Image (cartoon, rainbow, N blue to C red):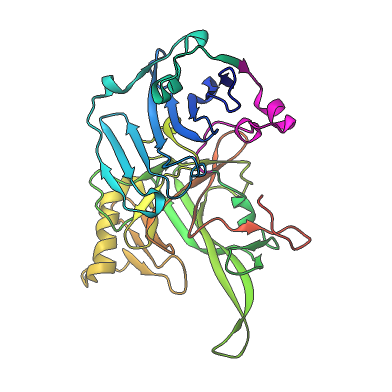
């Protein structure tokens, strides 16, 4: 981390945060009151001499009395992606006002920023605030600076942006673990519910929403050994007072669904990516996954994707009476409402319900050797673990 100062000024002029290992350079410019006025997030992609301006945010404070990042502060955010894609968002009244979204007009070769040598870095603050006097700078280690508890402690307790993290997914399938979903203060994980199996003879597992246009195939694919795998639901039991019955009621809710490739424990977890995803461009807590417009996802054999999807549509939507009796199976009282089977290949599709539309992350659990152990989708958010003393934990 490099901090730039001007003589006689208490607030920093600019802070530069660099992690080449994570393909990241961040710049912050500050006004005389120490308020962040401009953030620039740049990424090192395939050209080692250029930086990609992934995201910029500019806050335009209306007066000296407005606090830093006030919800009413006007701001402009620009996000850029390779291939000419991008979005410019203008919020003249801040977060609570109207939002105007347009598409930035520039070519990829016009968007990059030269990667300068260390002592030749151009000052963003000179462009934003027009400073001309030469600043001084100091290099600090984030951990050491944060321990000092100085004015920059909040800035220096820093790590590069990272995509969404899995959380304790494996614990959702371990009976006896106590969790909370935010609505119910205490839930206890029970034995995973086994619904059936899924045949994946092609060796390529698809995870997608079966209810939207798929001209380019399924959203997510995960290579697995060809075979037949167990389908499970992670469930938790909880009790609550039911006002309709006037008594205590116990029920069991599903938290996640999975394809179990191996009975061995998963030691690492990773976010499954779509074909065009590039982790080097992900901002903090960004997710990717499959999209659904009908609160439905599916696990399927990607090698028979098109015929399986056609069977899903005929069996569920059209209720085609001419379907082969083995091609369609209703599964009652389950998050997996149906399963279809392609007679030509033996590949299968198992649809599952989610609690809403939108994008749902897909998590791949792997062994120490990197082999796929399981593929998991949370049907809602990640529950929070409860420690033994009954208090909540952010684990």
What residue span does the magenta drawing correspond to?
138-164
Taking the spot 40% from the left edge, 68% from the top edge, the residue there is 337
Q: Is residue 168 left or right of residue 79?
A: right
261 is higher (above) or lower (below) than 240? above
* Placement of the N terminus among the 4 image quadrants: top right
Tell me where residue 179 sits by quadrant: bottom right
Tell me where residue 76 sits by quadrant: top left
Taking the spot 24% from the left edge, 71% from the top edge, the residue there is 319
Do we see residue 232 in this rendering?
Answer: no
Q: In the depicted view, which residue is nearer to us: 343 or 298?
A: 298
Taking the spot 54% from the left edge, 22% from the top edge, the residue there is 18
Q: Residue furthest right?
A: 389
233 is higher (above) or lower (below) than 59? below
Residue 105 percent location from the top left of the image: 22, 31
381 is higher (above) or lower (below) than 55? below
Q: In the depicted view, which residue is nearer to us: 266 or 240?
A: 240
Q: In the depicted view, which residue is nearer to us: 298 or 5?
A: 5
Taking the spot 34% from the left edge, 35% from the top edge, the residue there is 78
8 inside magenta stretch:
no
Do we see residue 325 in this rendering?
Answer: yes
Q: In the depicted view, which residue is nearer to us: 353 or 35?
A: 35
Residue 258 percent location from the top left of the image: 51, 55
């Amino acid at each position: 981390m490099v901090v730039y100062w001007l003589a006689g000024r208490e607030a920093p002029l600019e802070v530069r945060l660099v992690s080449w290992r994570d393909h990241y350079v961040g710049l912050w410019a500050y006004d005389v009151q120490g308020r962040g006025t401009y953030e620039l997030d740049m990424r090192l992609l395939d050209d080692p001499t250029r930086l990609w301006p992934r995201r910029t945010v500019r806050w335009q404070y209306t007066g000296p009395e407005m606090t830093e990042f006030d919800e009413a502060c006007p701001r402009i955010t620009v996000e850029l992606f390779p291939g000419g894609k991008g979005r410019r968002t203008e919020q003249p009244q801040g977060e609570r006002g109207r939002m105007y979204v347009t598409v930035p007009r520039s070519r990829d070769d016009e968007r990059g920023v030269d990667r300068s040598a260390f002592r030749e870095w151009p000052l963003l603050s000179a462009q934003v605030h027009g400073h001309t006097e030469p600043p001084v700078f100091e290099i600090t280690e984030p951990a050491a600076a944060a321990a000092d508890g100085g004015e920059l402690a909040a800035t220096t307790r820093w790590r590069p942006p990272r995509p969404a993290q899995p959380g304790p997914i494996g614990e959702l399938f371990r009976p006896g673990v106590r969790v909370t979903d935010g609505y119910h203060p205490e839930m206890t994980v029970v034995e995973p519910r086994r619904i059936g199996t899924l045949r994946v003879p092609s060796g390529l597992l698809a995870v997608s929403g079966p209810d939207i246009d798929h001209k380019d195939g399924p959203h997510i694919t995960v290579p697995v050994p060809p075979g037949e795998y167990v389908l499970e639901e992670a469930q938790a039991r909880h009790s609550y007072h039911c006002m309709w019955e006037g008594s205590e009621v116990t029920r069991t809710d599903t938290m996640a669904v999975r394809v179990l490739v191996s009975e061995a424990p998963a030691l690492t977890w990773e976010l499954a990516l779509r074909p065009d995803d590039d982790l080097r461009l992900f901002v903090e807590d960004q997710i990717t996954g499959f999209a659904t417009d009908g609160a439905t996802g599916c696990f399927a054999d990607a090698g028979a994707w098109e015929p399986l999807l056609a069977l899903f549509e005929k069996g569920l939507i059209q209720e085609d009476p001419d379907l082969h009796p083995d091609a369609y199976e209703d599964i009652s009282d389950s998050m997996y409402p149906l399963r279809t089977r392609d007679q030509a290949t033996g590949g299968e599709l198992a649809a599952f319900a989610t609690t809403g539309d939108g994008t749902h992350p897909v998590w791949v659990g792997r062994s120490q050797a990197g082999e796929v152990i399981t593929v998991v989708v949370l049907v809602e958010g990640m529950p929070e673990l409860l420690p033994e003393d009954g208090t909540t934990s952010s684990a």
